[in-house]
Image (spheres, rainbow, N blue to C red):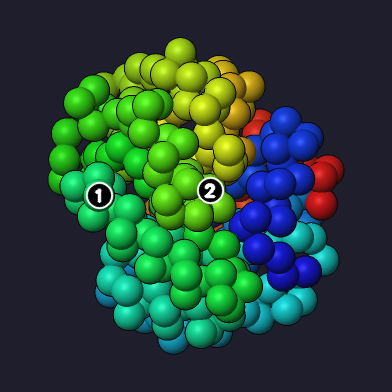
Amino acid sequence: MLVTLRDILTQADRGGYAVGLFNMLNLETARGIIEAAEEERSPVILGVAEVHLPIIPFTYAALIMNEIARSSSVPLCLHFDHGMEYGKILAALKAGFTSVMYDGSALEYAENIRRTREVVRAAHALGASVEAELGHVGGAEDGTDDGAAALYTDPGQVEDFVEKTGVDALAVAIGTAHGQYRAKPVLDIPRLAEIRRRCPVPLVLHGGSGLSDDDFRQTVQNGIRKINICTELCQEADAAYRAGHGFESSVTAAKEAVKRTAAGKMRLFGSAGRG
C-alpha cells in the first residue's frame, strides 16, 4: 500500500524502530527490495536518487516503482532521494512519489531554509512529505571529505530550521559518509541524542552502508527512524553478477543478493514484522 514518509516514520517513532530507504538502480534491485519487504512484513521506503538518473532514466524508474507500489501488501513510500534541482523534484511529485528529499546541505543556512521551504510548499500541496538535510554528509556522492566535524549538524539550529521550513523529516550529519568508507566511521552519538531532544520531527541517517550492527543499534536507540542504504546493495549485486554463469543466472543472483541484504537490514533496524 502506498503511504507517505510521514506515515511510515510516525509509526516508526511510536515503535522505536527505523525503516530502511533502499535505492534502486534497475529492475533487479527494485525486485529484491520489495521481495524482502514482503517476506519480512516490513514497511519500506523505495528510492531513486537524482545522482543515479544517468544510470536509470527517471521515466523508467517511475514506471517500475509505481507498479511495485500498486501491488505492494506492506506500507511503501516512493522517495526521490537527494534532489537538488527543483524541476526534477517537481517531476517526481507529479509522477506520484509520496516523498522527496531536498538536499540543500551545501548551501548557506538561510538559503537552505529558503529553498527547502519552496519544496515543502509544493510537496505538501500534493499530499507528499519532505525530508531535508541540516549539516552535510560528505563522501562519494559529492567528493567531500568523510566525517568532517565542521560539517556536523548543529543541534542549536535544529528547532529553527524545522519551524521555518515545515519539513517532515530531518537528515543529520553525525560522522557518516556516502559511499565506501576510507576509515572506520566514528559516530557522534551524544550529538545525535541532543539533536533528538531538540527536534520535533523524525531523524534520518544517510551513509548507512558500512556501519557496524552496533552503530545501527545505537543510532536507532537515539532517535534515528530512517536509514539510507545504497552502496551495500550495489556491492552485493555486483559480486553476484560477477560470480554468475551467464547473463540469466547473474540477473537472478543479483536480485537475490539485494533481497538478502535488504532483509537483513530490516531485521536489524527493527522494522521486520511491522508491516
Give the x, y percent position of residue 135.
30, 37
Q: Is residue 153 above or below residue 171?
A: above
The structure residue drawn at horizontal position 71% and vertical position 46%, both measured from the top left corner, is: 10
The amino acid type found where label 1 is placed reads: Ala
> In screen coordinates, is 257 left or right of 179?
right
From the viewer's side, name the closer residue of 24 and 15. Answer: 15
Amino acid type indicated by mark 2 = Ala
Tally of numbered discs:
2
x, y percent for residue 47: 51, 62
The front one of 81 and 125 is 125
Q: Is residue 18 visible?
A: yes
* Picture quadrant where residue 69 is located: bottom right
- Could you tell me which residue is drawn at 35 percent across and 64 percent down? 83
Q: Crowding near pointer 2: few (<14 within 10 Å), some, many (20+)?
A: many
Q: Is residue 242 visible?
A: no
| In-front residue for pair 28/41 | 41
The numbered dot on residue 169 is 2
Q: Is residue 19 above or below residue 116?
A: above
Give the labeled residue for mark 1: 110
On the image, the x and y values in percent for residue 198 come to 52, 28
